[in-house]
Amino acid sequence: MIKTKSLSLLVRLMILSTLFFSFISALLVIHENPGKTETINTPTGTDWIAPKYADKLKNPFDGDIKAAKEGKNLYTTNCSSCHGNKGEGNGPASAALNPKPKNLTSEKVQSQTDGAIFWKITTGNPPMVSWQKVLSEKERWSLVDYIRQLKTK
Protein backbone atom coordinates (compact mmCIF):
# COMPACT_ATOMS: atom_id res chain seq x y z
CA MET A 1 0.00 0.00 0.00
CA ILE A 2 2.78 2.42 0.86
CA LYS A 3 4.56 1.62 -2.39
CA THR A 4 1.40 2.39 -4.38
CA LYS A 5 0.96 5.75 -2.63
CA SER A 6 4.63 6.57 -3.12
CA LEU A 7 4.44 5.62 -6.79
CA SER A 8 1.29 7.65 -7.26
CA LEU A 9 2.94 10.66 -5.65
CA LEU A 10 6.02 10.16 -7.81
CA VAL A 11 3.92 10.06 -10.99
CA ARG A 12 2.09 13.23 -9.93
CA LEU A 13 5.38 14.97 -9.19
CA MET A 14 6.74 13.89 -12.59
CA ILE A 15 3.69 15.28 -14.36
CA LEU A 16 3.80 18.54 -12.44
CA SER A 17 7.53 18.98 -12.99
CA THR A 18 7.13 18.22 -16.71
CA LEU A 19 4.35 20.79 -17.02
CA PHE A 20 6.33 23.37 -15.05
CA PHE A 21 9.44 22.74 -17.16
CA SER A 22 7.34 23.01 -20.34
CA PHE A 23 5.89 26.32 -19.21
CA ILE A 24 9.30 27.80 -18.34
CA SER A 25 10.79 26.52 -21.58
CA ALA A 26 7.93 28.03 -23.58
CA LEU A 27 8.53 31.38 -21.93
CA LEU A 28 12.23 31.18 -22.79
CA VAL A 29 11.53 30.25 -26.42
CA ILE A 30 9.04 33.08 -26.81
CA HIS A 31 11.44 35.51 -25.13
CA GLU A 32 14.38 34.48 -27.34
CA ASN A 33 12.35 34.09 -30.55
CA PRO A 34 9.35 36.42 -30.37
CA GLY A 35 6.63 35.35 -32.76
CA LYS A 36 8.33 32.03 -33.51
CA THR A 37 5.70 29.87 -31.83
CA GLU A 38 2.70 31.78 -33.18
CA THR A 39 2.38 29.77 -36.38
CA ILE A 40 3.93 26.46 -35.44
CA ASN A 41 1.78 24.24 -33.25
CA THR A 42 -1.37 25.18 -31.42
CA PRO A 43 -3.84 23.23 -29.31
CA THR A 44 -6.14 23.27 -32.35
CA GLY A 45 -3.90 20.69 -34.01
CA THR A 46 -1.87 22.67 -36.55
CA ASP A 47 1.01 20.55 -37.85
CA TRP A 48 4.44 21.42 -36.56
CA ILE A 49 6.64 21.73 -39.60
CA ALA A 50 10.37 22.31 -39.38
CA PRO A 51 11.81 25.03 -41.63
CA LYS A 52 13.32 23.91 -44.95
CA TYR A 53 16.88 24.56 -43.78
CA ALA A 54 16.44 21.92 -41.04
CA ASP A 55 16.11 19.23 -43.71
CA LYS A 56 19.68 20.01 -44.78
CA LEU A 57 21.14 19.35 -41.33
CA LYS A 58 23.16 16.14 -41.43
CA ASN A 59 23.28 13.69 -38.55
CA PRO A 60 26.96 13.22 -37.66
CA PHE A 61 26.11 10.02 -35.75
CA ASP A 62 23.76 8.39 -38.28
CA GLY A 63 23.74 4.64 -37.65
CA ASP A 64 26.14 4.90 -34.70
CA ILE A 65 25.07 2.15 -32.27
CA LYS A 66 26.83 3.80 -29.31
CA ALA A 67 25.02 7.10 -30.00
CA ALA A 68 21.67 5.28 -30.22
CA LYS A 69 22.33 3.63 -26.83
CA GLU A 70 23.08 7.04 -25.33
CA GLY A 71 19.91 8.31 -27.02
CA LYS A 72 17.88 5.54 -25.39
CA ASN A 73 19.14 6.53 -21.94
CA LEU A 74 18.40 10.19 -22.63
CA TYR A 75 14.96 9.29 -23.99
CA THR A 76 14.10 7.25 -20.91
CA THR A 77 15.14 10.09 -18.62
CA ASN A 78 13.77 13.06 -20.56
CA CYS A 79 11.15 11.99 -23.08
CA SER A 80 9.29 8.87 -21.96
CA SER A 81 7.15 10.68 -19.39
CA CYS A 82 5.34 12.38 -22.30
CA HIS A 83 6.02 10.20 -25.36
CA GLY A 84 5.79 6.85 -23.51
CA ASN A 85 8.26 4.01 -23.14
CA LYS A 86 7.76 2.88 -26.74
CA GLY A 87 7.40 6.38 -28.23
CA GLU A 88 3.68 6.06 -28.91
CA GLY A 89 2.77 9.41 -27.29
CA ASN A 90 1.10 7.82 -24.29
CA GLY A 91 3.43 8.56 -21.36
CA PRO A 92 1.96 9.32 -17.92
CA ALA A 93 2.36 13.10 -18.41
CA SER A 94 0.57 13.02 -21.78
CA ALA A 95 -2.85 13.01 -20.13
CA ALA A 96 -2.38 16.61 -18.99
CA LEU A 97 -0.93 17.94 -22.25
CA ASN A 98 -2.62 19.72 -25.14
CA PRO A 99 -1.71 19.08 -27.83
CA LYS A 100 -0.87 15.47 -27.05
CA PRO A 101 2.70 14.26 -27.63
CA LYS A 102 3.34 12.82 -31.07
CA ASN A 103 3.61 9.11 -31.71
CA LEU A 104 7.29 8.90 -32.60
CA THR A 105 6.80 5.49 -34.23
CA SER A 106 4.28 6.89 -36.75
CA GLU A 107 5.01 7.24 -40.44
CA LYS A 108 4.38 10.98 -40.14
CA VAL A 109 7.29 11.36 -37.69
CA GLN A 110 9.55 8.68 -39.13
CA SER A 111 9.29 10.13 -42.66
CA GLN A 112 10.82 13.41 -41.49
CA THR A 113 14.52 14.03 -42.03
CA ASP A 114 16.98 13.61 -39.19
CA GLY A 115 17.56 17.36 -39.43
CA ALA A 116 13.86 18.15 -38.96
CA ILE A 117 13.62 15.90 -35.90
CA PHE A 118 16.83 17.40 -34.49
CA TRP A 119 15.46 20.90 -35.06
CA LYS A 120 12.24 20.03 -33.22
CA ILE A 121 14.13 18.56 -30.26
CA THR A 122 16.36 21.64 -30.20
CA THR A 123 13.63 24.25 -30.64
CA GLY A 124 10.74 22.73 -28.76
CA ASN A 125 7.14 23.75 -29.23
CA PRO A 126 4.87 24.06 -26.20
CA PRO A 127 4.00 21.91 -24.48
CA MET A 128 7.20 20.24 -25.70
CA VAL A 129 10.20 21.94 -24.20
CA SER A 130 13.29 23.16 -26.02
CA TRP A 131 16.21 20.89 -25.20
CA GLN A 132 18.85 23.24 -26.62
CA LYS A 133 20.06 24.50 -23.25
CA VAL A 134 19.58 21.19 -21.44
CA LEU A 135 21.16 18.66 -23.81
CA SER A 136 24.35 19.02 -25.84
CA GLU A 137 24.23 18.90 -29.61
CA LYS A 138 25.66 15.36 -29.53
CA GLU A 139 22.98 14.28 -27.05
CA ARG A 140 20.20 15.71 -29.25
CA TRP A 141 21.58 13.87 -32.29
CA SER A 142 21.76 10.71 -30.16
CA LEU A 143 18.05 11.13 -29.44
CA VAL A 144 17.41 11.31 -33.18
CA ASP A 145 19.28 8.01 -33.62
CA TYR A 146 17.18 6.39 -30.90
CA ILE A 147 13.92 7.78 -32.31
CA ARG A 148 14.82 6.10 -35.60
CA GLN A 149 15.05 2.78 -33.76
CA LEU A 150 11.54 3.17 -32.34
CA LYS A 151 9.96 2.38 -35.71
CA THR A 152 11.44 -1.12 -35.58
CA LYS A 153 10.32 -1.95 -32.03
Image: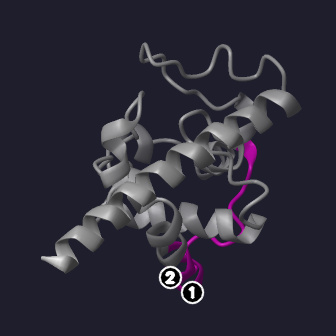
Q: Is residue 134 left or right of residue 65?
A: right
Residues 133 and 110: in front is 133
Span colored in magenta:
56-71
- The answer to whether residue 3 shows anywhere in this view is yes
Q: Is residue 121 above or below residue 8?
A: above
Residue sitting at the far front: 2
In this figure, which residue is indicated by the disc labeled 2? 69
Alpha-carbon span between mark 1 and mark 2: 5 Å
- Residue 108 image label: none
Please give the name of the residue rendered at 65% of the width and 64% of the height, measured from the top-left corner. 141
Percent across and percent down for residue 148 are 45, 61
In this figure, which residue is indicated by the disc labeled 1? 66
Figure quadrant of residue 64 = bottom right
Mark 2: few/some/many CA within 10 Å (<14, 14-19, 20+): some
Q: For the residue marked with disc 2, what is the amino acid?
A: Lys
Please give the name of the residue rendered at 47% of the width and 49% of the height, measured from the top-left corner. 16
Percent across and percent down for residue 10 are 36, 66
Residue 29 painted magenta: no
- The answer to whether residue 103 shows anywhere in this view is no
Figure quadrant of residue 76 = bottom left
Percent across and percent down for residue 120 are 62, 42
Please give the name of the residue rendered at 71% of the width and 65% of the height, measured from the top-left corner. 135
Please give the name of the residue rendered at 19% of the width and 78% of the height, measured from the top-left corner. 2
Q: Is residue 20 above or below residue 8?
A: above
- Identify the secondary structure beneath mark 2: helix
Residue sitting at the far left: 1
